[in-house]
Amino acid sequence: MKERNRKTKSSVREANSYDEGWKEVIEKFFPRFLQFFFPQVHAEVDFEKGYQFLDKELERIVKKSVTGKRFADKLVKVFLKDGLAKWLLIHIEVQGFYDVSFEKRMYIYNYRIFDRYDEEVVSLGILADADKNYRPSRYEISRWGFRLLFEFPVVKLLDYLEQRDLLEKMENPFAVVVLAHLTSLKTKRKKKERLFWKVKLVKLLYDKGYTQEEVLGLYRFIDWVISLPEALEIQFHKEITSYEEVRQMPYITTAERIGIQKGIQQGIQQGIQQGIQQGIQQGIQQGIQQGKREGIYEAISLGLELKFETAGLALMEEVKKVESIEKLEKIKEVVKRANNPKEIELLLRTL
């Protein structure tokens, strides 16, 4: 039992680290998400009428829950093609670790959402954990003639382990998402193998013929779930840069990578001007640090603009007063999770 608890705590920390990646990719490719994992649902949804994510409403509805943390849960309002039901709510939950209360939580969220909107609610589960025997799909209470049965469809990502070749051939973006997730699970302590698969998966984005927007969206997920040590990350970027040049498709030019490369080049030039090897080495190191800093500035700026537009960009003057890379990384992470610019303002005052 103690061993199971230790594994669970470790899994919780890892699952939480993937949370934003899953939320972002589901929202960005929502119709394809349903098409890949729940084709029957996809076939009956009228996407021409649009759909609406209600994450803030979900947060308010379940914030007092006593059943533990959620992992990448989403609430989406969709319309149907049948002409009978005007609309329904789809509650999606990606569960990334073993949790004895998962079925109960799915039931609680479902009835709370129903109680709030008085509309039909369908709950869908994605099991992203590493335990092949963990397959919760129902919550039941039965006593004295009373019976409550709540069942919901789930997809177990581990079931795709033997279908890697098929996934590599599929066009749906979530084939790549599943490949990236499984790769992350299977290469935790195999750094070189992790590098190999990260390079392969990113190259696969080009081979599948995705648009630039699709490539960047999926790359962000891959980069999120398949992290590498700094030395291997540099090697990864070199390989992808070369590949992009060959394909003449320079899509993955992330702000941080550009900053690092510029910093290295500036450092080399400074060192050459000093005329001695020591100067070159010092210049390179200084350039790398400055490059990282500039890259993170760019990443924060992009995040603020995308999430909060002008109000977000107005904060960059204060952000650029922060020089510590560690503090800048913290700001970048908060930007990803923030719901409004005031959260960033509060953080900046404490740094």
Image: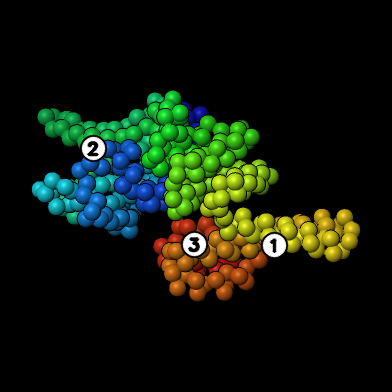
Upstream in sequence: badge 1 or badge 3: 1
Q: Which residue is mark 1?
A: 290
Label 1 vs label 2: CA separation?
51 Å
Q: Is residue 290 visible?
A: yes
What amino acid is at disc 3? Gly
The label on residue 245 is: none
Question: Marks 1 and 2: which is nearer the front?
Answer: 2
User: What residue is shown with label 2?
Assistant: 40
Task: Work out how far the residue at label 2 is from the one at label 3, CA to CA, in angstroms.
Answer: 35 Å
Dot 1: element: helix
- Which is more N-terminal, label 2 or label 1? 2
Q: Which residue is mark 3?
A: 303
What amino acid type is highlighted by mark number 2? Answer: Gln
Residue at 61% in and 60% down: 295
As displayed, is residue 195 above or below residue 2?
Answer: below
Q: Position of residue 186 (x, y in %)?
A: 53, 31
- Tell me which corner region of the image, top left, top right, bottom left or bottom right, holds residue 190: top right
Q: Residue at x 57, y 74 (%)?
A: 317
